[in-house]
Image (cartoon, grey):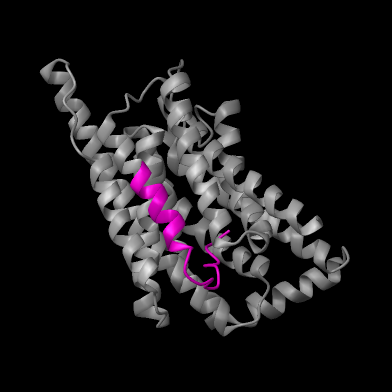
């Protein structure tokens, strides 16, 4: 009974985190207000900082709230193992790029289209798992990847909607930028996730310590990106320009959401994760249509979404490979 409750609790947490992050991020990027809009690069930096603090507190708790034990762990696992720590610079840089791309994507795509298209990360993760980890996929999994590609292609199928030529041209340009950002994020997510999994399998470090190491590099890369692309705006109005309650919710969800998922994922099997993804896509579509009112669904979109949901279930049907411990 307790195990069953934990499974359904995991399902609820997965659905809430996935759906709320996408919708609040989309809402925050389209919200019209006075003054400057918040900088996506700044939000990535703040999220990394919050993630480091959270992981430090978790390690602190694991060692009976001992400052001496925490200091010893950080010295032994980070300062005294520079080569092992430097290995995480690669996935950390890719994750930082990915986090920035997600803001670009949700600035140009509605939440429903983004949610469905981003499921291509299943395909990229599978391909990198085969090439980098030597993992073998079953017949159902290969079939699911073909169905997934067909579903995403249908979701991106151009629809004929009335409008002015200027608006249609702007919409097409925004759609292209958004889809390109999602596709690059899918490839980066697949590679970085498998690379991180390989590192975790080679060592016995705590996942929280690994996330501290990732967060350190992520903070450095994020600051570099922020000053490279938004340096003038930061100097003029500060890095917290345009921040409001919604912005802080987005940052908190991005920083803490992955850590929550890492904590509960062991209770959720592949089928349950498929349920979570499917419910998240459905909720995102409904809320995007009724609340954000930035999405006009078509029959082709629904066909594509059904195929993507089917592929998600099918991929987790055959066997139970070890879950990909993507970066928290």
Q: Quadrant of the C terminus?
A: bottom right
Say if the magenta span includes residue 196.
Answer: no
Q: Position of residue 257 (x, y in %)?
A: 61, 48
Q: Inspect this view and state whether residue 320 appears.
A: yes
Decide if residue 31 is on the left or right side of residue 108: right
Q: Is residue 111 above or below residue 188?
A: above
Residue 323 included in the magenta stretch of the image: yes
Q: Is residue 58 above or below residue 319?
A: above
Q: Is residue 274 left or right of residue 249?
A: left
- Looking at the rendered image, the quarter that the N terminus falls into is bottom right
The spot of residue 174 in percent (x, y) is 24, 33
Q: Which residues are magenta?
A: 306-328
The residue sitting at 34% across, 78% down in the picture is 131
Q: Is residue 86 above or below residue 291?
A: below
Q: Position of residue 15 (x, y in %)?
A: 58, 43
Q: Nearer the viewer, residue 309 or 52?
A: 309
Q: Residue at x 77, y 71 (%)?
A: 71
Can residue 231 be seen by looking at this rendering? no
Position in image of residue 223 (x %, y %)? 47, 51
The answer to whether residue 128 is above or below residue 145 is below
């Amino acid at each position: 009974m307790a195990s069953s409750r934990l499974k359904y609790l995991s399902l609820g947490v997965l659905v809430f985190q996935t759906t709320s992050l996408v919708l609040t991020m989309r809402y925050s990027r389209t919200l019209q207000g006075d003054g400057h809009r918040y900088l996506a690069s700044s939000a990535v930096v703040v999220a990394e900082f919050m993630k480091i603090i959270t992981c430090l507190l978790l390690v602190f708790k694991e060692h009976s709230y001992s400052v001496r034990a925490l200091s010893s762990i950080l010295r032994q696992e980070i300062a005294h193992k520079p080569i092992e720590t430097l290995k995480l610079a690669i996935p950390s840089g890719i994750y930082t790029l990915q986090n920035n791309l997600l803001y670009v994507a949700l600035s140009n795509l509605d939440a429903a289209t983004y949610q469905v298209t981003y499921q291509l990360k299943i395909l990229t993760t599978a391909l990198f798992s085969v090439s980098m980890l030597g993992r073998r996929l079953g017949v159902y999994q290969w079939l699911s990847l073909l169905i997934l590609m067909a579903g995403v292609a249908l979701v991106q199928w151009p629809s004929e909607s009335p409008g002015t030529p200027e608006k249609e041209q702007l919409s097409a340009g925004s759609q292209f930028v958004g889809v390109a950002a999602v596709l690059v994020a899918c490839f980066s997510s697949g590679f970085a996730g498998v690379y991180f999994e390989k590192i975790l399998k080679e060592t016995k470090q705590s996942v929280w310590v690994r996330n501290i190491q990732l967060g350190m590099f992520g903070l450095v890369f994020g600051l570099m990106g922020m000053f490279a692309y938004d340096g003038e705006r930061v100097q003029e109005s500060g890095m917290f320009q345009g921040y409001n309650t919604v912005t802080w919710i987005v940052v908190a969800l991005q920083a803490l959401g992955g850590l929550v998922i890492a904590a509960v994922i062991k209770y959720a099997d592949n089928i349950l994760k498929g349920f979570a993804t499917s419910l998240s896509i459905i909720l995102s579509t409904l809320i995007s249509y009724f609340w954000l009112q930035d999405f006009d669904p078509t029959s082709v979109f629904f066909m594509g979404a059904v195929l993507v949901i089917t592929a998600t279930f099918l991929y987790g049907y055959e066997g139970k490979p070890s879950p990909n411990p993507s970066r928290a």
